Amino acid sequence: MMLTIGAFAKASRLSPKALRLYDELDLLRPERVDPDTGYRHYAPEQLERARLVAWLRRLGMPLARIRTVCALPPGPAAQEIRAYWAGVEAETATRRDLAAFLVDHLTPTSEEDTTMLELRYAALSDTGLVRPANQDTAYAGTRVLAVADGFGPAGAPASTAAVEALKTLDRETLPAGSVLNLLEDAVRGATTAVRDIAGGEDGTTLTAMLWTGSQLALVHIGDSRAYLLRDGVLFRITHDHTVVQSMIDEGRLTPEEATAHPQRALLLKALTTDDTISTPDLRLQDTHPGDRYLLCSDGLSSVVPDPTIQRILGSVQDPETAVRRLITEANEAGGPDNVSCVVADVVEAWASPRREPSQADGHGDGEDTLPR
């Protein structure tokens, strides 16, 4: 028995207006349209698809993506929904961080309530035991922390150029309330600098932080990582832009399977000559006194498990000693890649002596690499 558009709308919880729109978009065609009156009639078997469309709309999924989901068998459709929701959660987290920043920025504070904080930091880069040259760059200064992992024939100058473009922020006065815009502008400069050097196969990852005095603005693209050690617990605060990470997000691969996947180093995003894959993630990170941050290239994270990283960060007090311990750990695990680390502690200003910036890229006289 055919259902009128009114009866079908009531059963599917979609309005007649929505059903007419979905007909026009070829998303949910009626079973029959009366040639004389134009009335739409639907088969009861179409209710399942209509309800799926209604549920997906409640999730906020765009109509074009709903069409894709509806065209898939149940298993792949579930994976598509999972991938969409992972993106929604990532975007929501970024917006939540921005909202928290704005609330904090606009909330008046008295001098008695304000604790002056600063960073105590160290950076180190090492060629590793297998690669003939070091294409990484690591930098730590009073405001800027950065790790870049170059690839391709011009990978080394590409990573250096990206970090050099951010170092200007170490010398500038930061205008209140516009730190993300400032960092985004600096990343555009980094992208331009990389493109001036890179060919079609060249590029670099970039994971960097800009210190405001109370928060860290984070920029991230590629598979270098940022970690936070807070109250003894290690958190990864970046998301890898790799093929295997996308497969994990979609439920097609477990984290354990990813470690041995043949495409685990294949990047989906990086700073390159291609505009479509050069858009980084930007977010704000609240800080607490006692926080410890680690930025590292995949030469560390691919061979040293998170529990070991947590143990070293939690047991070694001095940042310079910590970066050396981490790189030694990577080399003892075979050192298959260049490895770079930046460790920065958030401390009360009186507790930290003023330090000079530290850069390590392995492209010069070798003083920034570990002795063999």
Image: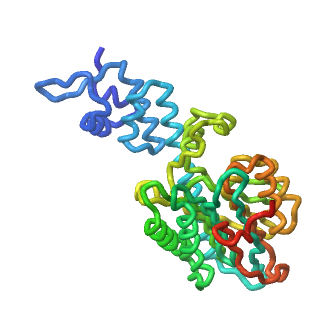
Q: Residue 131's spot in the image, x, y percent?
A: 66, 53
The residue most toward the left is 36
**Residue 128 at x, y percent in the picture:** 72, 55
Image quadrant occupied by the N terminus:
top left
| Identity of the residue drawn at 63% across and 56% down | 224
Residue 52 lies in what quarter of the image? top left
Q: Nearer the viewer, residue 31 or 307?
A: 307
Residue at image point 85% right, 58% down? 314
Query: Hey, which quadrant is residue 143 in on the image?
Result: bottom right
Taking 349 as reference, is 89 above or below it?
Answer: above
| Residue 64 image offset from top left, x and y in percent | 36, 41
Q: Residue, x 55% and y 37% (percent of image)?
A: 250
Residue 35, compared with residue 97, is above or below; it is above
Above-or-below relation of 40 to 241:
above
Residue 367, placed above or below residue 30? below
Q: Is residue 215 visible?
A: no
In the rendered image, residue 115, in percent from the top left (x then y), is placed at 77, 79
Residue sitting nearer the eye, 351 or 123: 123
Q: Quadrant of residue 196?
A: bottom left
